[in-house]
Image (tube, rainbow, N blue to C red):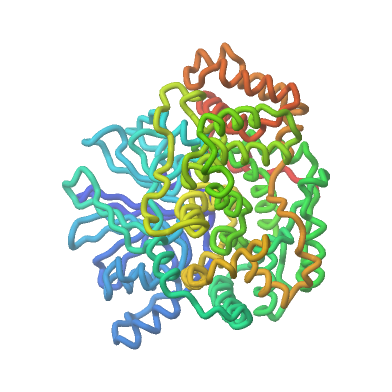
Amino acid sequence: MAAALAHRGPDDEGVWVDADAQIGLGHRRLAIVDLSAAGHQPMASPAGRFVITFNGEIYNHLDLRRQLRAEEKEPHWRGHSDTETLLAGFDSWGIKETLQRASGMFALAVWDKASRALILARDRVGEKPLYYGRAKGPDSPFLFASELKAFHRHPAFEPEIDREALGLLVRYLAIPAPRSIFRGVSKLMPGTMLTLAQGQVEPESEVYWSAADIARSGLANPIPSDAEAAADELERVLERAVGRQMMADVPLGAFLSGGVDSSTVVAVMQKLSARPVQTFTVGFHENAFNEAPYAKAVAKRLGTDHTELYVSPEEAREVIPRLPAMYDEPFADASQIPTHLVSALARRQVKVALSGDGGDELFGGYGRYVLTAKWGKRFGAIPRPLRTGAARVLRNVPAAQRIRAKLLKSASMLASNSQDEAYDLMLSQWPDPALCVIGAVGSKTSLGNGIEGLDGIDRMMAQDLLDYLPNDILAKVDRAAMAVSLETRVPLLDPEVIQFAWRLPLDFKIRGGTTKWLLRQALYRHVPRELIERPKMGFGVPLDSWLRGPLRDWAEALLDQRRLGDEGYFHPQAVRKVWDAQLSGQDNGFKLWTVLMFQTWLEAGKAEQDPINLSMLAPRLSA
């Protein structure tokens, strides 16, 4: 099982087994902090009570060591790894309190010899993945791993596809936690601990940190409405967060798209660094998808050591057959392709890369927030039958990709009965998955659960922080980067940044139609406004033109009506109707990609491809 995760940790390996307790821990190490043998895992605590296997980084672990020293609880240190710091904290404060004191990203498993219990835990916002479940029933082994490919190496594991999870995939591009593509296998929720005592069948879960609680607390205690003072404090908070995450004993760099979020992270990195920061961008020859010139201009202004690589459409498409091995379960955010390419580019020179993810969810960066918030004023008084009919018309209007995206968003607005429903439809590719997936009935996230008391745009941002961010954005980055053994870090998701962002008045986030307003004010202290102000592009590929062009035969084979009927997962006529419309000029690329990614994943499984073949994962990029 550990060997299946060699790409996540090519530097070292270890296994610890207690045969009497029937517990085994495996580990693959990507050495970032303390490269010596003192960082080897699985690792036992100083008192010997706890044994851990841990993926991630604890950025404030030196602060934790100082706290232990101040409380006269400091052990004799063997090295300077954050793993050893965590274990010392467990001995002194217990697991829950240590996690609450720690600032970092992680998935970990701990065996407590005293209570004879296994404890699993995941970081606050879900930067690192953690799957768990029984191999094939209540009496079978309890398995856990960073990726599903490890499960397949256990002889007792008998996977069964969950059709409700497939319905969630075609709706939201990704399968949201706690579900996975397989029945009986779950993703641990962010900010959660899971305890399985020996003899128990079902583990018990406990939330040690809640993003929703942080949101409510922040909104109840807003900062004073002084924009200049707020920008000053934001810059100080960002400097502390970025400074913590620049901790490494190996080369470190950053992804740079030239947008607000990545430019802000790089600007702060460069301010804190005595040498040029290494930055990386992948460019495309299709102008509508190419951010490389903007990134280059920002890099020149900041004085970074910038590397850009223009990728041909053929090189980008070569990633597609490798996606099932990278993601283990079907995943359909098409920006997975450029994300993997920029990760591979960065890995040539560095072992750690910082990214700007999280800025949209915390500082109001998505245009859909404003659009959805206007639902009541625009459509609330129109009778539902009229709205539904108008929505049906809009969804069938042929149009270019970007125009069609706007039409579909308008259609979602019209067909909704509430802001929650409008926002859910805004995020949906197949609004009714049952029309696409055979046997999918519910296939809807628990929208609104946990965010009671929040309204309007605040409610949507909180929902994205709990759902869209960990299940799509962070999963995409983690798998795309770890496939080439690159660690990614997200300083905008530092707990201090999250707490500060939720104390900001909404007017500091979205002002006069400008998103991320305060974040921009902080950035403009480092980079001229004219280098940043432009329409939001995203990080994608020209799916629609590819599907009508070079990917047409590939898609046609996967969407063959007889094949779909024989496999029995999709309604063949429904899928073919969308495919035929695509070939006729209607842009349904994102919708079709959800089906194609499942089909590609299913085909890879049938062919019994080795999911850990690193030569297959390594992208072939031109020099």
Q: In this view, does 287 lie to the left or right of 569?
A: right
Where does residue 201 sit, x and y in percent of width and height?
20, 43
> Residue at left 72%, top 43%?
620
Image height of 432 relative to 347, above or below: above
Query: Toward the viewer: 66 or 5?
Result: 66
Can residue 561 be seen in the rendering of this structure? yes
**Total of numbered circles in the picture?**
0
Give the image location of residue 370, x and y in percent: 60, 54
Question: Which residue occupies 52% across, 53% down?
Answer: 469
**Outermost residue toward the top?**
562
Q: Position of residue 108 (x, y in %)?
A: 38, 58
Q: Residue at x 39, y 69 (%)?
A: 217
Horizontal relation, residue 129 to residue 286: left or right: left
Q: Decide: is 537 above or below 168.
A: below
Q: Quadrant of residue 291?
A: bottom right
Q: In this view, does 336 lie to the left or right of 94?
A: right
Residue 244 x %, y %: 53, 74
In the rendered image, is residue 12 in sight? no
Specify the quadrant of the image occupied by residue 530.
Answer: bottom right
The image quadrant where one finds the N terminus is top left
**518 and 71: which one is in front?**
518
Position of 489 compared to 101: left or right?
right
Residue at the image point whose x is 46% and y is 31% from the top: 167
- In this rendering, the answer to whether 603 lies above or below 261 is above
